[in-house]
Amino acid sequence: MSAPRLDWQAGPGDPLRGELSVPGDKSVSHRAVMLGALAEGSSEVQGFLEGEDTQATAAIFARLGVRIEAPSASRRIVHGVGLHGLGAASEPLDCGNAGTGMRLLAGLLAGQAFDSVLVGDQSLSRRPMGRVITPLQAMGAVIEAGEGGLPPLRIHGNKVLQAIDFKSPVASAQVKSAVLLAGLYARGSTRVVEPHPTRDYTERMLAAFGWPVRFSPGEARLEGGHRLRATQVVVPADFSSAAFFLVAASVVPGSDLCLRRVGMNPRRTGLLDALRMMGADITAESSGEQGGEPVADLRVRHARLRGIDVPEALVPDMIDEFPALFVAAALAEGITRVSGAAELRVKESDRIAVMAKALQALGADIAETPDGAVIRGGRLRGGEADSHGDHRIAMALAVAAQRADGEVRIRDCANVATSFPGFEALARGAGLGLQVCAGVG
Ligand code: S3P
């Protein structure tokens, strides 16, 4: 899936005011399609993210023989085929830009009676898959990767999988989920223990689909040989998409914005804690529950931010939010230090290097460290910054531009559609100065 080149021209706009709703959660949308496909009966997904990543996952299950209806935008009816009902695809399965898609599918497909090949775009083709291949091989899976454990993945079917007691060396929900999904097909009791708790959507959703699973922060356990039963999944708004507006409204004077019904799973809201430590004025109102997940309206008003040492314990709970946090830090008073975040180097881009370069291009004082950065807040100037095709970096830079002294050209923004389709219009409606222009060169 290679989208045409697209640049943005961004610069100071208006204060962010009013109310807005961001699209559905990416992690939950991927899993809803996967478990719906393996369930018995038809599952309805409401609030499905119409992003390229999650659409790629839905397309893959269609190729594997699952009928998926889209009666309207953000709704899917997944006609499940049962745990053993998938059929082989004749061509490689394209995960696009989605690490979640590829890593979770590696676990799920390892348990099938047929072979599969998983491929991805340029960015995904550079991302490490050894972290899922190693535990899956220990379970008896046979998976071949390219050099250095990179995609494509050739997954051989018809293997008898054995349960595993896996102590993951990396705090990764994708690794945990890959092992748990393979565990559905394995003999015995599979357990995953993590070095730090990560998002628990796979565990929660397996339980909602009727699979017995025991979990607590940092640990999950299930046995093979049960069945998944169709259910209704209500997807909350994605905290990671809301994050850009939390930072934008915090840094633009005069802002007072309400983000409606945002997913507040505690394994996702680390940025909220970090921003509050920096002095942000964000309140959670009308807290409630939606589809078994905590949600709240988040009201954010402009505040003067000051630099902090981001506690390492918060890192896994805000792992996707560092591009936004770096922007908040670059505009805060004083120094912000990030450490214990080496995982950022293997996301859709090397988010430490790409953010450091992009913010430096706008005049920020930011130095990389192997596992983080040191950022001294100050002024930003206009100029040109490259997102390297990383959706979250493009959106973070659009936020930074709101406080720059001049216009900022942001390169290579088409991949924003992987996680946040319609960001440009929604952001403009909220007050951001942002125009789309054709990419050149
Ligand atoms: C995700 C887990 C995280 C996150 C990614 C989505 C998931 O990755 O960065 O955007 O849906 O499980 P890791 O588990 O590799 O940290």
Image (cartoon, helix red, strand yellow):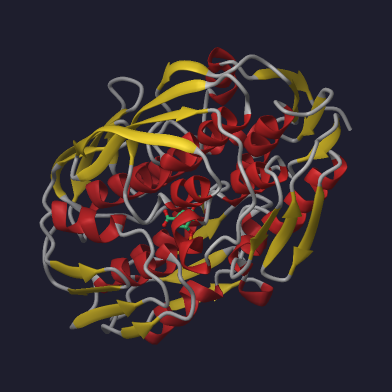
Residue 390 horizontal/vertical position (percent): 66, 44
Quadrant in which residue 147 is drawn: bottom right
Quadrant containing the N terminus in the rendered view: top right
Quadrant in which residue 341 is drawn: bottom right
In this orientation, which residue lies closer to the viewer: 227 or 402? Answer: 402
In this orientation, which residue lies closer to the viewer: 57 or 367? Answer: 367
Number of numbered discs visible in the structure rendering: 0
Q: Is residue 317 above or below residue 113?
A: above
Residue 16 falls left or right of residue 228: right
Residue 43 falls left or right of residue 250: left
Residue at 69%, 51% in the rendered image = 122
Residue 159 falls left or right of residue 415: left
Quadrant containing the C terminus in the rendered view: top right
Residue 132 visible in the current orientation: yes
In this orientation, which residue lies closer to the viewer: 48 or 133? Answer: 48
Residue 200 horizontal/vertical position (percent): 30, 59
Residue at 70%, 26% in the rendered image = 402
Residue 24 horizontal/vertical position (percent): 37, 34
In this orientation, which residue lies closer to the viewer: 299 or 71? Answer: 299
Residue 350 visible in the current orientation: no
Quadrant in which residue 424 is drawn: top right
